[in-house]
Image (cartoon, rainbow, N blue to C red):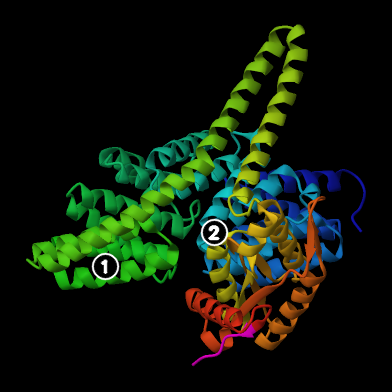
Amino acid sequence: MAEPGIERIDIEASIHHAWSMLLVDPINACQIANDALQAALQVNDQHGAAHAQLILSKHESRFGPSEQAIARLTQLAAYFRSHGDAQGQLRAEQALAQIELEQGAPHQAVIRLQRLITKPELLSALDHASILNTLSTALTSSGDRERGLRMAYQALSVIRRQQGTPISALINHNIGVYQLNAGNFDLAHKLLHDARQTIQPFGRTSLLGLFSANLALCLIHQGQLDMALKIIEPLVHESCTNITPRDLGFVQSVTADACFRLGEWSRGEHYLDLADTTLGGDDDPFFVGYLAFLHAQLLAQQGQSESALAQCDIAIAASERSHDDQLILDVINLQSQIHADRGDYQHAYQLARAFHQRYTRVSAFANETRYLTLQVQHELAEAQSARDRARKEHAEAEQARQKLSQLNRQLEERIEEIESLQSALREQAIRDALTGLYNRRHLQDALPQALQLATRTNWNVCVALIDLDHFKRLNDTHGHRLGDLALIELGKVLRDGIRGSDFCCRYGGEEFCIVLADMPASAAQLRLNGLLQQLKARLITDGESQFSGLAFSAGIASTDRFGHDPQRLLDAADKALYQAKAAGRGIVMIAEVL
């Protein structure tokens, strides 16, 4: 037990201060944490010592994850868990997730981080926003870019009352990087510029290099090469005690890129050599791809086209893994130029077409992100601006106090209304209005994901297509109102008859689709036969007319027979459905490989 008195108070205050400084001044933060650790050990304050060790271990992991730091963070997470310290546990777990992310395991990081946000009411705003921000990066790195962006804006919303802090700058920076990768350079420029402006008053912080590098990269894409160099070149010789090796290597790489594009090849080659030295052995796909692209530019300029093309191949492969669409576009463009310079116009033309096709896809994605971002960004800025004006009025006169309070409430309600509306719109886009089931658009996204999971877990997945029997005759005889009620009733039977791991969709018209995970085809047939009997027993009525005995036909295709290609499974299930119809309807048939 710690001795009572001022020692305990000083230890807690020092740890809080060190933690708040860790992002912007890691050297002083670690010195304060080390002093707090020694003080805690002197008074036998094990809990204070654990929190001080957490700060030191997080710093160690950030500046190059070591096995020792990972082991210590794992031990600290277990210690905090056993002592009921939710804050300590989540901070240790978040540090471990960050290591997993740095080591190229974003899916593991996502799983770990999602466990931490199950009870947001237990988290402080800073910790909650920090976890959401890391989760955003992990989701984006794993390829789920839409959810990644959504998490980033959620983090920004959580911390909207603490703008101007390092964590708010980091979140804005990460959203800016997302927009940069999407090709929305105007949005990216503002976000990255604002993030850098926010962090500059804190001095030459550990974040300045990262923020400056991404802002300079955005300026490069906007053609502002001189401005990019002005921002980034002063940082190329920054000490690695104040900036991580990766961030320093990134700074040097972007500086080389700007020089190459300006035609200053010797100057750029010098910075590329620095980046190679700093990032030597780093297998992060982004840096592998970016360095390969830079070497390809230099080799092409030196007339070594074969070597340049080999580096382009490396850059493309790495950039596909890091989901860096902008870098892929740059590399394809460079490949086309190299082939054209060699007189190989056929290859140059093919690559130019490939560039155009990918550029079209990237542009479409960029436009989609604007719907998700611009309105929310604008509304949050409006809310903040109005709140600031109201506070100024409050300072000028007591009468403005009531107006401020009312305005703040209205703004909060408006923000919640907008967030709720956007959530509802996203859900509405993948729901069938009549049955409430998912629609075909959702199936197009969810089925490939379910099949990818099945591949990793070695599960068998069954895809069933279901068609309501004699639906046209039902509409002609009883009218469209009862026809709609029949579809609704079938939707209820299907929804109530599946497990949490399964999902069902309205495929189109009177046709439905069920995806059943970890289930053999024979069990799926039994399940659907049971649902068929339930449907037959249902009474359909609109108050004036009624009927029963509604039935469906179904075809089932399973991955153990047809593999994991979504379209092949759907085609096989559709063929089995057709056979079930031909055999007399009201039948569930399993597709067989011929």
Q: Amino acid at mark 2?
A: Arg
Viewer-closest of 566 and 472: 472
Residue 448 point in image, percent of width and height: 53, 70
Viewer-closest of 331 and 245: 331
Q: Which residue is mark 2?
A: 441
Residue at image position (76%, 66%) is 493
Q: Secondary structure at mark 1?
A: helix
Q: Earlier in the sequence, mark 2 or mark 1?
A: 1
Viewer-closest of 508 and 390: 508
In magenta, the rendered stretch is 589-594
Q: Characterize the local packing of mark 2: few (<14), some (14-19) or many (20 or more) Cα atoms within 10 angstroms.
A: some
Residue 235 point in image, percent of width and height: 38, 46
Q: Characterize the local packing of mark 1: few (<14), some (14-19) or many (20 or more) Cα atoms within 10 angstroms.
A: many
Q: Which residue is mark 1?
A: 312
Q: Amino acid at mark 1?
A: Cys
In the rendered image, residue 352 lying in the magenta stretch gets the answer: no
Q: Is residue 205 visible?
A: no
Residue 60 point in image, percent of width and height: 59, 62
Residue 219 point in image, percent of width and height: 33, 42
Q: Residue most toward the left? A: 343
Q: Residue 535: name its quadrant.
A: bottom right
Residue 255, above or below 405: below
Residue 525, above or below 505: below
Residue at image position (23%, 60%) is 353
C-alpha separation, residue under disc 2 versus residue under disc 1: 36 Å
Q: Residue most toward the front? A: 477
